[in-house]
Image (tube, coloured by chain):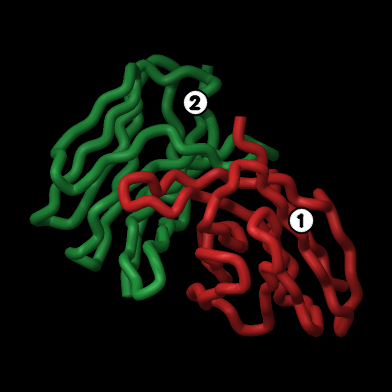
Amino acid sequence: GENVEQHPSTLSVQEGDSAVIKCTYSDSASNYFPWYKQELGKRPQLIIDIRSNVGEKKDQRIAVTLNKTAKHFSLHITETQPEDSAVYFCAALRGGEYGNKLVFGAGTILRVKS
Amino acid sequence: DVKVTQSSRYLVKRTGEKVFLECVQDMDHENMFWYRQDPGLGLRLIYFSYDVKMKEKGDIPEGYSVSREKKERFSLILESASTNQTSMYLCASSFYRATNEKLFFGSGTQLSVL
């Protein structure tokens, strides 16, 4: 089955710096890779996603890149702000007989220091 | 705005008790999911359902069962609670469409088993 590894587990950056979180997946058939952000005490929310037919996607200060050959994808946050502090989860969509299921990474705690 | 509502925010139960966690969504979503969230382990899928009365095991179904009698409601049942089931439980829902896998999460139930 699909396995998703996420690194680093914690990341501290200075406000205004960039942050990069990386994930690798094992199932080459996976074709959808979302990123969820979970602020302290709140529910996870989708912030950006990418499909396997695209190499890069950008939305304002966040971007995601996908390397299908190497089976890894990354989240890039530029000009970080204190409100970016949260836990970030990557995921890969695993197909199954009864529908697709997301497999999540272990999460990255991002702290933006002001 | 999509609403996924979990009946309890905090729950304290004793070992051996039968525990019911309830989840209701108001967007007519076909898919519903139960995840548990533990530090360093990310979000792990317990069970999911893609239609009324249909259910499929996720990655960690042992010690749990589910019920989906109505489309909007998905219940997670701990038949005999144990201390290793102390965790944050997150319910989620999504449309059953090949191009839309976005998950909408509830606020979570923090379950403590003493």
Q: Quadrant of the C terminus of chain B?
A: bottom right
The residue shown at (48%, 36%) is A110
Q: Is residue B57 left or right of residue B111?
A: left
The answer to whether residue A95 is above or below residue A57 is below
The answer to whether residue B106 is above or below residue A59 is below
Q: Does any portion of residue A10 appear in the rendered image?
A: no
Where residue A39 sits, quadrant-wise, is top right
The residue shown at (37%, 34%) is A48
* Amino acid type for the residue under numbered disc 2: Asp
Residue annotated with mark 2: A84
The kind of secondary structure element at disc 2 is helix
Looking at the picture, how far across and down is residue A107, in whole percent? 47, 50
Viewer-side residue, B105 vs A113: B105
The answer to whether residue B4 is above or below residue A39 is below
The kind of secondary structure element at disc 1 is strand
Q: Chain of mark 2?
A: A
Residue at the left extreme of this rendering: A69
Within 10 Å of the Cα at label 2, are there few (<14), some (14-19), or many (20+) other Cα atoms? some
Chain A: drawing colour: green
Chain B: drawing colour: red
Q: CA distance from mark 2 to mark 1?
A: 24 Å
Viewer-side residue, A3 vs A30: A30
Looking at the picture, how far across and down is residue B92, in whole percent? 58, 52
Q: Is residue A40 left or right of residue A26?
A: right
